[in-house]
Image (cartoon, helix red, strand yellow):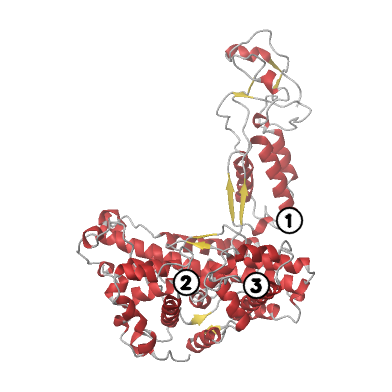
Amino acid sequence: MSPIPDFATRFSIFQKLAGMEEEERRSALRPHDDVDLGTGDADIKRLRERLDDALDTLTQMEIGCELSLYDLTSLGVDSKKILGPVLIKSDAFLRYLGAYLYFGVRIFAGRIAPPPWWDPGYQGLRPEFTYPFVNKRTLQLAVPPSVADGTLIDPDVVNPRVVDQNYKKDALDSFLALIPDPDEAAALLFLDGFHPDETNEQTFDVDEPAEFDLWLRGLRPGLSSERAERFTRIRDGLIKWSGRHAAFYISLEPEPTQRSWNASNPLSRRRPKDGWVITNAVSARIALADFYWIARLLRAEVSASGRVSYPRTSWLHSLRFQSVLQDHRDITASLRAEEEVLRSAFDFVSDLILNSVEVTNALERRAFEPEQHPDSLNDPRIKVQPWRAVFDAELRELELQKNTREYSCPRCEPPIAPTPLTGDAEQWSRRLSTLRDTRHRVGLALSGGGIRSATFNLGVLQGLQELDLLRHIDYISTVSGGGFIGSWLVGNVRRSQHWLGRLTCWDESIEHLRSYSNYLAPSPASSAQTPGPSGSAGCAMPSSSRSLGSPGSSPSSPWYFSPSKASYTPRTTYSAQTPPTCSTKPTSSPTPPGPEASDRWTSSPA
């Protein structure tokens, strides 16, 4: 990796900011989305450009440290003097880092100047007694574990790829070589919110993003030649930037994925089974430098704690919309794949940032709210596991189940349990520190709505089974009527080895399901069948009848409704008694449910 040059000149901006009063820093570092930062503010723009250059360098240094390419002593600079205590405690500086998503700088600050309360034996005051505000946030974030050297585990790769120092060094060098060309630079300025006004060079046009979106959708005819030329340049720059960076992240993936991506024609790319997914832990570290730009490209909103939301469609979607209108199929295919890659890389680095915030909050609770920390239980019999450790164990179990369901390893042994982590290390996801490939997890949600929902969801399950997709599902979430059919599915999965497979016949179980779920269905004449004061014939299930899937059990209530015999006619029974049917003839007067209701039962052959 090329050395980082000229530390003294590049980091002098930090000393300049530290010499300002807090009010002056707040004015200079205000986000230009909140205050109109016009072209007339030349001095402030130059200061911010120098600051961004220095912060990008700190992010690069943090990436190098996380990749174990160098440590702080090898940088040739006193790292503890880079960010002094004034900037670390400055609300204006913290707000600037949050507005422009410099999470890598906040992690680097935790590396070079960790707060004293990160020490397990800290016995100090609470933050509200140390700082003027009770809810003051801390600039430093917990440092993730370094990416371990080792072998990328992938069942589809015959010769696994060894990841070592040279590999990580080449990966970072390749990323640093992605220097934007003039079109890309114009596109990045557009994403950053700088939109020059054609009529006034001292201001910015705040309506340009909306106008550009309309132009991409073919809804903005009659633009001036200057504006149309600028929009074309921005469009070309966005396409170039997304294509080059997506190709970079793909280059760190296994060889089969690279070969498919590097097809001569985008239309001939063969999408992997799990999609264009970024799984290399090296990519998550390097994406710290791309985090802001990908967020802007996807038009994502990121909170100070790293939580992501998508209130609007991405610019890549709008670009793809225009390519469809112009019948550029190759561009459409490229943009679709590139958006999938960049979203995957963005999700990976977001997971790293969220994990860092979670660990930071846990360290703070341990120091200032020890009674809320698991260690306060003082009971050796109780071991409270962090959420990340439990989730990693769940992923290992899912991996074994997925191999069995997909017949890729029907008799494979359970995955070897990794070396137990101790201390704060167990709070970090293993995905961030190891090179183990993780596949997509797929979930199926079955909504509620009574018997109608259960019937509809049964049809959905049958369709998924016929398409041989059901065995690829890892999670199932149900509610109400969806829970009824979900319980039926899970019960059969536990009783049958290959229930989710395409060749398994469900007919007998579905027949039984239809025959013994009458109590869920309303009567055709529901208003005349409702028992109680309104008055009509009701139906009671004798205690000898059996509920679905659990022979010997009875419904929780003896009162239920039965549909007409034409719709559901039981063919088999679990008991010697003949299942009773309900007379639909209404009574002459309202009769409350009681023992005398049994007189209204009529028997009919099954």
Q: Residues within 10 Å of mark 1 (few under 14, many from 20)?
A: some
Question: Mark 2 is on which residue type?
Answer: Leu
| Residue at 69% over, 31% down | 573
Precedes in sequence: disc 2 or disc 1: 2
Q: Nearer the viewer, residue 164 or 512?
A: 164
Q: Is residue 272 visible?
A: no
- Please tell me which residue lies in front, 399 or 189: 189
Q: CA distance from mark 2 to mark 3?
A: 23 Å
Asked whether the beta carbons under mark 1 and mark 3 sit within 8 Å of each other, the answer is: no
For label 3, count other residues whose C-alpha is less than 10 Å away and answer few (under 14), some (14-19) or many (20+).
Answer: many
Give the number of the disc on residue 338. 3
- Say what secondary structure mark 3 lies in: helix
Marks 2/3 in contact by CB < 8 Å: the verdict is no
Callout 1: helix, strand or loop?
A: loop
Q: Earlier in the sequence, mark 1 or mark 3?
A: 3
Amino acid on which disc 1 is placed: Arg
Whether residue 301 is visible here, answered yes or no, is: yes
State the quadrant of the C terminus: top right
Can you identify the residue that label 1 sits on? 502
Q: Which residue matches tag 2?
A: 432
Of the two numbered discs 1 and 3 in the rendering, the one whose residue sits closer to the viewer: 3
Tag 2's secondary structure? helix
Residue 527 picture quarter:
top right
